[in-house]
Image: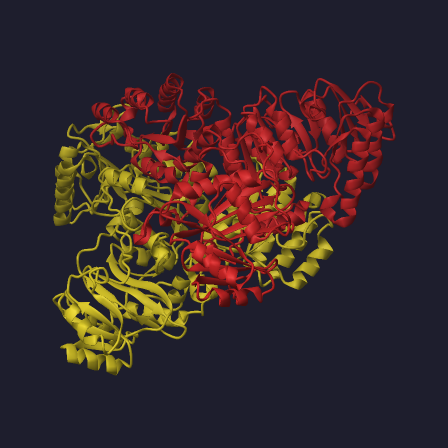
Chain colours: A yellow, B red
Amino acid sequence: MSAISALWNAESIAVVGATERPGALGRKPLDFLLRHGYKGRILPVNPKGGEILGVPAYTSLREIPGPVDLALIMVSAERVAAAVDDCAAAGVPLAIVASSGFAETGAEGAALQADLVARARAGGVRLIGPNCIGAVSFNNRVLATFSPLFGAESVPFEPGTLGFVSQSGALGFGAASLALQRGLRPGWVVSTGNDADVTALEVLRELAAEPDVSGLLGYLEDVPDIDTLRVLSASGKPVALLKSGRTEAGGRAAASHTGALATDDRVLDAALRQLGIVRVDDIDELLDVAQAFEFPLRPAGPRVAVVTTSGGSGILAADAVEGAGLELSDLAPESIAALSEIVPPFGSVENPVDITATVLSDPTLFDKSLDVLIADESVDIIIACFCVMAGPDVEKAVTALSKAARKGGKPILVARTGADFLAPDAPAMLRDAQLPDYPTPARALRAASALWQVSRPRTAPAAPGDGPGTPAPAAAATEPELKRLLADAGITVPRGRTVTDAEDAVRAVRELGGPAVAKAVVPGLLHKSEAGGVLVGVTEAEAPGAYAKLAALGGAVLFEELAPEGVEVLVGARSTALGTVLTVGLGGVFTELLDDVSHRLLPLAPGDAESMIGELRGAALLRGARGRAAADEAALARVLEGVAGLVASWPGEFELDLNPVRVLPEGAIVLDAAYTTTPADPAAPVRTATEA
Amino acid sequence: MSAISALWNAESIAVVGATERPGALGRKPLDFLLRHGYKGRILPVNPKGGEILGVPAYTSLREIPGPVDLALIMVSAERVAAAVDDCAAAGVPLAIVASSGFAETGAEGAALQADLVARARAGGVRLIGPNCIGAVSFNNRVLATFSPLFGAESVPFEPGTLGFVSQSGALGFGAASLALQRGLRPGWVVSTGNDADVTALEVLRELAAEPDVSGLLGYLEDVPDIDTLRVLSASGKPVALLKSGRTEAGGRAAASHTGALATDDRVLDAALRQLGIVRVDDIDELLDVAQAFEFPLRPAGPRVAVVTTSGGSGILAADAVEGAGLELSDLAPESIAALSEIVPPFGSVENPVDITATVLSDPTLFDKSLDVLIADESVDIIIACFCVMAGPDVEKAVTALSKAARKGGKPILVARTGADFLAPDAPAMLRDAQLPDYPTPARALRAASALWQVSRPRTAPAAPGDGPGTPAPAAAATEPELKRLLADAGITVPRGRTVTDAEDAVRAVRELGGPAVAKAVVPGLLHKSEAGGVLVGVTEAEAPGAYAKLAALGGAVLFEELAPEGVEVLVGARSTALGTVLTVGLGGVFTELLDDVSHRLLPLAPGDAESMIGELRGAALLRGARGRAAADEAALARVLEGVAGLVASWPGEFELDLNPVRVLPEGAIVLDAAYTTTPADPAAPVRTATEA
């Protein structure tokens, strides 16, 4: 059993700073543990000893006989270090430090926090927090928290299958209360505050190993650790994350809240997509997704059929399909024929299938139309839309839907645009039938999208490859050296060589079979073209002059063949906080003005290179738009795969830029290459220098 | 009093097809009118006469003595025509046709519907429907509907200030029930079904004239009528519309539902933005906006200050500002200084201002920090974020917020991420204090955005100008004719003229002062360049040959001066279902691959031309990106304004394409112009032909 799992398995909980004083935070955990019927040992710690709420108190953690699985520390910041030392001395494996006054207050607090972590590690204690609100397990009634949520008279307290971990305690327990209000069943709610030792993601990873967990939700401010993300992904449990600081304004706010480091947010998007982890933008969306995660059915594909009793809901559902990243299914002709026998003439047998309000007088319409959609192999997900439906109608609908879902093994999500007061039993009936239930079609589709995101084949392998790989180039590697490396990796570069003098330059042009490109190779010369370091179309006659001009720039001189016309793209690989990221973008205005690039975390999975290219807004340019010949996308994909393999085992912080890579009608050729080992700014946009 | 206002003013309501049979739809309106205490005359009509639910029934509308303000027709489709004739005979000014079986069923039903409208118009009866669920006024208890909503035991029935009109009855009453569940106060709910005579938008226009209406909401499937939209906009009442069929899939579904015509959805977006009408994408969003429309405070600008008790909520709020089209305010230095005296060290005095949970022990923190933000002139809107807060804390917060809002006249929107069971009185307290209340920061910001959209200075004048204008060109106008028209309107075109023979061509080149552009002027020759109809850089020596070559294409030959280098854009004007629309886009990949264009409905208001250009994703290209000279944006704006004035009074369906317009470092010049009067396909994308 890991130390962290004491958050839900603890058989003994010490509360350091416990007090009976009414209104004091230190009273609340005891109050909650007693009130909600915690079965383990409750161990208040207060220097005064005595009894607290009728429970014998200890003057120190060290005084407690027998093992303590979990300590909740609620003393003021300057007294926390001693409490952690006490945990170490008493062999407490996990301490939650609720106290504020650490890294969130500035440099002094950060030092205090570092000291705390050092003490904990030396003493074999794992730390949650500081600056958090604690944790609760609804299943085992472990309430190591002072959240006012559990002081409310009417807080529902039932076992649940959703695990929710939040860096922000207030937001986490606030969101949990909204989840309870919706009738969701959180089983675990954990706040981790400053994530000084145990991170929110580590807690999610531990929860993923719990068999009762049906889905995991996280609110994060820090950039998540990629290795933990990979383990989470590999667990097979569905995961949705709300990672704030997505915008520049949000990023600044996050830095001032927990000192979170900014990263290129789109790299995180790409990584999560590869790992089959859902990213959401709002608490509401997190809860919508959570509801779908409570139930087991998963789609085999992204094709949606909509069945509706209201034409309006059907249109709204159709409108929402595209934005949800799903597809409106083209129903099989036999399905349309079968529906024509069932659906009234003022309905619709095309998708969205509008069975109209006639279903109220003939409930078999439901069963029959669902039978058709369940049997149709071009349907992976069904969205069932209703408006105002009173109690008995809901019951009939739920019975039909539930039977269909079980029979077909296809998830059915309900959009019920009507108040609960119309059918007070509907929420419970839908839950019992394992049908996720949303007030609007768009929200049902958003949840359906999440189900598809966690079910579709994942493109990211569990961990980066650890084969021998190619060693990284020297920090000062020149363009010809880099191109040799690329050529050795099977990536096409222009034929050419460095020349030694004017005569050799003439020979080089002759060898290259016609007018050539001559380039200065001067380490540190970034803007080669602007510095006059690139000459295009150099003939034999011009070669000596070209050589002299370029040599005067102080470095070697490279002569290369002229590449044919094609579409110019950039390909880059760089180290980031999440690992090495491969980037492709179209040259020119696409990257410079529109930031039209796509990313993948390495290693690539089969198909990744092609889908990276397909994601570019300007991808049509490669496919022969604007009267050009189509470029060899497959060759570009091979370049991406080649670069991915090449840099797989390069250590440290680096950036490799192949810019431009010219994609020809057949083949693709790297015209320029640059390599830097300067520590990359993780927030910096992808470099878009034109040919240097 | 307009006929339509009988929906809420009727002093007598006839129900044609009334019956006492339990479960029958024809029983419900009577049941509702009686149960909810309608004060006017209830007039059941049934061929059998007698009494229905204790109310004397008439065998025909024609038998009813005294005036009938409103008839609700609930007979089967084939009997509706007779009922409408009865309305005409009895002088009933407004009839709601609930019956289905009309245009929504196909061509036969459409003919039946057309006949119905013709009868109604001939008889002086306005028609709502057919295929609708009727209407309700919560204020006057007019219940001309059979929606099951009003059969629910617990339906709240209080007066309200929100008017909601929906083409879809099921969706409309479903959304209304959700509004009631949220504690919103709809005063009017009207469904208009097929909009055969009275449209949903007309009902909204009538409601806008009602003094008690605080805000208007609409669900539309048909393209709205621009004149009615202008009247709505001019009413000053805040309006939000959910117009479905936004996507291709949704558009297809809408066409099959009510036969709605597709339009270029982005043209509608532009028109609504110009008119200060909010467009939403989901029922949830409509209700969020509605809540803000219930209260009177409006922002003077888009600058948001966030005050939060939870760092996490603050970050989420900051993240959501940009997407909401608002700005995170840069607080004044004196505000930051003042906040530094107030906010605890582990909070934040920058925006978002994190006053932390310390406010729970010191509620004056609220008052003090709000005082600072209210006094700061760089703050237009305040978003106040809370998480889990129990009852007494909410009361203190609401008191402080309410005082601040009243004092400063700035709208304050609340994001309360906590369940109602934590503070059961909170919703009522917040409503009484006129503070809109949302569960997440993102939703509060979405509503704040709507408040700003309805408050900011509107750019669309109330109606198109009706000055003398310039007559439209002939349908077969040639390029030189169009260019003359443009030049007369003050728009720069290249110097040049048509030439009569080879010698004249030489003279023309000489007059133009150097190598010229020669173009074939052949009506109907669309792809001039591909047909060899454009020759660039023609010298005096080459002029005779060029003339011969172009003349051989069968039309006139135009010689023009060569324009200097610049950035190429396209400018277009075309008639659409909403009126004449002006379009600007950058040339090349921007329009062809990225559809990077912006639209305005004419007439333009001051500043519109500039903001159109600013909206382009590639606008930076005009500002000297990629090492080019900056182009003369002001000159391009003048071209847009010139074209807007030129086409202002052109009648009928037309499309004028100026493509390319070259924007120079100084000035802008129209290089090619084409004009068609072929009825434009309103769903067609903007034409992006390169220089023809």
Please state if B608 lies on the left or on the right of A480 as rendered.
right
Please state if A51 lies on the left or on the right of B40 as rendered.
left
The residue closer to the viewer here, B509 or A209, is B509
The residue closer to the viewer here, A358 or A123, is A358
At a point 43% along the width and 63% down the height, the residue shown is B539
Would residue A683 be visible to someone looking at this image?
yes
The residue closer to the viewer here, A156 or A116, is A116
Please state if B648 lies on the left or on the right of A465 as rendered.
right
At a point 25% along the width and 30% down the height, the residue shown is B349
Q: Residue A559: where, in percent of width, then height?
A: 22, 75
User: Quarter-wise, where is residue A563 in the image?
Assistant: bottom left
Q: Is the C terminus of chain A in the top left, top right, bottom left or bottom right quadrant?
A: bottom left
The correct choice, above or below, for A633 with respect to A217 in the image is below
The residue closer to the viewer here, A438 or A515, is A515
Would residue A649 be visible to someone looking at this image?
no
- Number of labelled discs? 0
The correct choice, above or below, for B99 with respect to B48 in the image is below
At a point 80% along the width and 26% down the height, the residue shown is B44
Q: Residue A571: where, in percent of width, then height?
A: 31, 64
Please state if A589 lies on the left or on the right of A520 as rendered.
right
Q: Residue B678: where, in percent of width, then height?
A: 64, 51
Q: Residue A360: where, in percent of width, then height?
A: 69, 43
User: Quarter-wise, where is residue B304 in the image?
Assistant: top left
